[in-house]
Amino acid sequence: MSATDETFPDTIHTSPSASSQPARPATPPPPATPRVAIWPAAIGAGLAAMIAALLVRFVFGILSPAEIFGDRFTALLPLPIFARLLTLFGPSTKHIYYGALLLGQGALTALLAVAYWRLRAWLRSRPPMRPRAALADALPSYVEAPLLALLPWLLSAGILAPLIGGGFFGANLEGGVAGVFVSALLPDLAFALAFVTLLRRNAGTALLGDASSARGISRRRLLRQVGFGLAVVAGAAVAWDFITSGVGSVLGVSSPRRPPLDLSNIGPDRIVPPPQPIYGTWSDVAGLAPEVTAAQDFYYVSKNLAGDPGIDVASWHLAISGRVDRPYSLTYDALRNLPRVERYHTLECISNEVGGDLISNSLFTGVSLADLLNHAGIQSGASELIFHAADGYADTLHLAQALDPRALVVYLINGEKLPQPHGYPARLLVPGLYGMKNGKWLTELELGSGGFTGYWEERGWTREAIVKTMTRIDTPHNNDLIAQRPTFVAGVAYAGERGIARVDVTTDGGKTWQPATLRRPLGNLTWVLWELPWTPPASGTYILGARSVDGTGNVQTPDLAPTLPDGASGYDSVAVHVG
């Protein structure tokens, strides 16, 4: 019997007394039962499961198995690999990761279909099962579809989930046992029905004599295609790294890799007393980021692989719980009716690289976080605030940070409701901390006594997430070709709640530095725009760089560091060609 195809020998009839009857001409054996193409049916079933998972996700908002298990896989991914992927693909990393998880889901379900077919054929060939000649009798019926649909769930929830720390049948995964089951229900049913349908259709083609069309693709061809797909993914990563760092400089395209600066004359790392900011005459420089970021342009980063939670504000409420005397909850209208606080505030993602654009500044409106917590009566044993979000995200703030009078729960940005990607209906806004500590889609504020591990902390990122001083050059761009005439070097600087006291600019690769003109910031927790008039003295290539001194006198560190685990550091620099 073939490993992938099921055929059965004809029943042999014998007479009790063959010698007493006249010999009859031998009857030719019936034609062999045609082969059934198993791999096309298995691959088609895997694709059906992938499509069903996507449809359920985007139509009904139910998390897909790839999201639930992929979320847990990120905690198991070695940090060097995680950091390298983040460096290669930046904000696109999660989309590539999600696509790879979907492909993996499809491949595993296809392999499961083949294993089921082989096991079924083996069981049917064992006594006391009687072999049959008809191919139709050997095929699975739609009655078997529910059993077949249970297999992926049993393997993923019953075996894989415990192995990756998700608990028995996904008890520790997002949504628990019920959530894992519901997420797999329709994709697994689609898989089972597609497999039975395609298998029976292929068998029908074989019975009509079109055996060649039913052979489908062989195992070797499947392996070649899988290997080719993996090679494409790996090749894309290498190609992206090469293009963005090598070819870009040849073609004059901006590259994320910055030209080196001479750091032998950077001066002290702290200035005492701190310099006083220079707010001089300001010129509007083309290419400089707008001081206030429009809501639709505000930087966006999310852990969610396929989509963010859509919240019905009519049923939403914000719970204040934990180590408090009077737990309570607020509806959206009740939150908006509390005394308002309005403030300009800059947010930066901890994944923002040197010179990166994962930073924005807008006007936010909300209520005092400290007032919300104090109204519940904080108990003496509380030491931290654990904030929970609708997408399962959770992290902590030190109690002192949560009670900072500048910390807010906000619901408006630039006078409009928070867009769904930015945390509607409410999010946190905490001074001096990276975006990972400014939770979106808030559902609960829980006072705890310590020991809680946040989502990104569990995956190797810092617990503190204090913003590092950064300076970005917005104009000119790396490898720009400019004329030998007066121009501007301009950009933004940010140091969280420490503020910016001075921005220094070099136009000779770091040999000398001169202070730039600052624009008076919109608030104490915002970025600062800066500019320096510059006339290139001659044609040639110039390396420009920028650094900042924060309000406490600390000079921005020149030491290059990646974003993981506590944010990037180093000086931004660009090379310009004067002709």
Image (cartoon, rainbow, N blue to C red):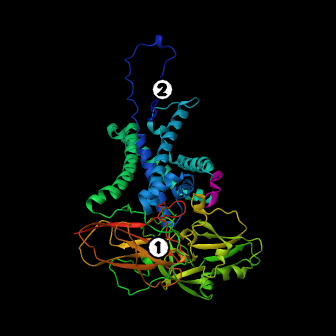
Q: Secondary structure at mark 2?
A: loop
**507 inside magenta stretch:** no
Q: Residue 545 is drawn in which quadrant?
A: bottom left
Question: In the current view of this chain or complex, which residue is farthest to the left?
Answer: 579
Q: Is residue 172 above or below residue 17?
A: below
Q: Tell me residue 137's x, y (percent).
A: 48, 38
Q: Residue 85 is drawn in which quadrant?
A: bottom left
Give the crowd class for mark 1: few <14, some 14-19, many >=20 residues within 10 Å.
many
Foreground residue, 195 or 344?
A: 344
Amino acid, disc 1:
Ser
Foreground residue, 501 or 124?
A: 501
Instruction: Give the residue at mark 1.
Output: 548
Would residue 175 be found to the left or right of residue 291 on screen? right
Residue at image location 43% in from the left, 40% down from the top: 38
Would residue 570 be found to the left or right of residue 368 on screen? left
In the rendered image, is residue 188 in sight?
no
Q: Tell me residue 290's x, y (percent).
A: 40, 80
Q: Is residue 311 above or below residue 140?
A: below
Q: Which residues are magenta?
A: 166-177
Q: Secondary structure at mark 1?
A: strand
Q: Quadrant of the image for the C terminus?
A: bottom left
Instruction: Give the residue at mark 2.
Output: 11
Amino acid, disc 2:
Thr
Give the crowd class for mark 2: few <14, some 14-19, many >=20 residues within 10 Å.
few
Foreground residue, 195 or 355?
A: 355
